[in-house]
Amino acid sequence: MRILILLLLLTPLMLLAPAPAPASDDMPRRTADNLIVAAYNIQWLGQRRHDLDKIARVIQHFDVCGILEVRNEKAVPELVGALETLTGKDWGYVYGVRTHRPGSHYHEAYAAVWRRDRARLGDGLVSNVWDLEEAFRNDPFVVSFASTNACFDFAMLLIHTRWSDDEEGSRQGEVAMLAEQLAWMRQFIPERDWLVAGDFNYPGDATPMREMAQQAGLLQIDPDQLSTFKTDGSGYASAYDHIYIIDEETAEFIDGQCGILDATRLVYGDNSPDSMKKARTEISDHLPVWAVFDVTGPDDD
């Protein structure tokens, strides 16, 4: 009887357990006092038949956007062309080397695009990390940026972990190695503000992610919203895309201004099954994660 009563008491609590929040098509207003930074896994960019004009309608809302899963680099300047046509602004781009595991023909590269009137390349790295132990399937990429008024600069580390474990490594091993890589780079790169962003293939509350954040001194600033599509396009599935900052270092982050942008609703007007299937085919099977930073200065490093 006591067990039955306990179950009856716990059932409402279990039903009320928080789940990852859905994405939103609300975006912060771009002002002279802020910088909007994003990371976006665009599935097999340059290999699939994407609609670059639709992708540009999403990325136009960001000032700096790191891009994951570049399969053909020529798509990056083509995307920049679509952005410039849409916005009437000058955009820059950069991308890293293709990375792949020994014996594998599959490769990916990282890229970043930015609005030149809002941001510029900063002092520091524009490079893939040195993956001496071959821990990563896709070697992370670091690119340094600064706001055009030079009041906020940062190093952005982009990562895309493997989705499934194989004989060459594991997601858990990649996430653990990320903390070591970041600690190593911070020994010789005099930059206090680091943004670690991308597709981790883990929700933020997963044990490997919490251990990595604790070891690296990182703070997850995104709200763990759903960011991946179900394979049939019928809805969103997992909270895998995140942005971290160095805890107690990046004071420029505007608290609460971070999220997942619902590209489906933004581009197609709704989240109907038909719209979601179109989005998954024409745009990506992920949604972008974004955060807003204050650029009123002065710079702290």
Image (tube, rainbow, N blue to C red):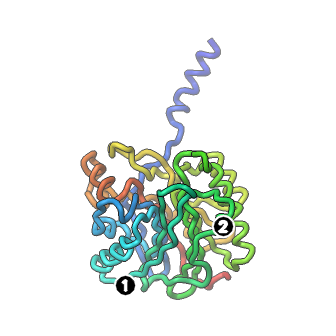
Ranked by sequence position, the earlier of labels 1 and 2 is 1
Q: Quadrant of the C terminus?
A: bottom right
The residue lying at 57 percent from left, 81 percent from top is 152
Residue 187, given in percent of the width and then of the height, sits at: 75, 73
The residue lying at 72 percent from left, 66 percent from top is 183
Asked if residue 115 is positioned above or below residue 249 in the image, the reply reads below
Q: Residue furthest front?
A: 103
The residue lying at 61 percent from left, 21 percent from top is 6
On the picture, is 19 further left or further right than 183? left
Q: Which residue is mark 1?
A: 90
Task: Specify the quadrant of the image occupied by residue 73.
Answer: bottom left
Residue 21, given in percent of the width and then of the height, sits at: 46, 49
Q: Amino acid at mark 1?
A: Asp
Task: Specify the quadrant of the image occupied by residue 71.
Answer: bottom left
The label on residue 16 is none
Name the mark nearer the viewer: 1 or 2: 1
Q: Secondary structure at mark 2?
A: strand
The residue lying at 28 percent from left, 69 percent from top is 53
Q: Which residue is mark 2?
A: 246
Asked if residue 300 is positioned above or below residue 264 in the image, the reply reads below
Q: Which one is in front, 159 or 38?
A: 159
Residue 284, given in percent of the width and then of the height, sits at: 37, 57
- Mark 2 is surrounded, within 10 Å at the Cα level, by few (under 14), some (14 to 19) or many (20 or more) other residues, namely some
Q: Is residue 50 visible?
A: yes
Cα distance between the residues tagged 1 and 2: 30 Å
Q: Is residue 36 visible?
A: no
Q: Amino acid at mark 2?
A: Ile
Asked if residue 117 is positioned above or below residue 171 in the image, the reply reads below
Residue 249, given in percent of the width and then of the height, sits at: 68, 71
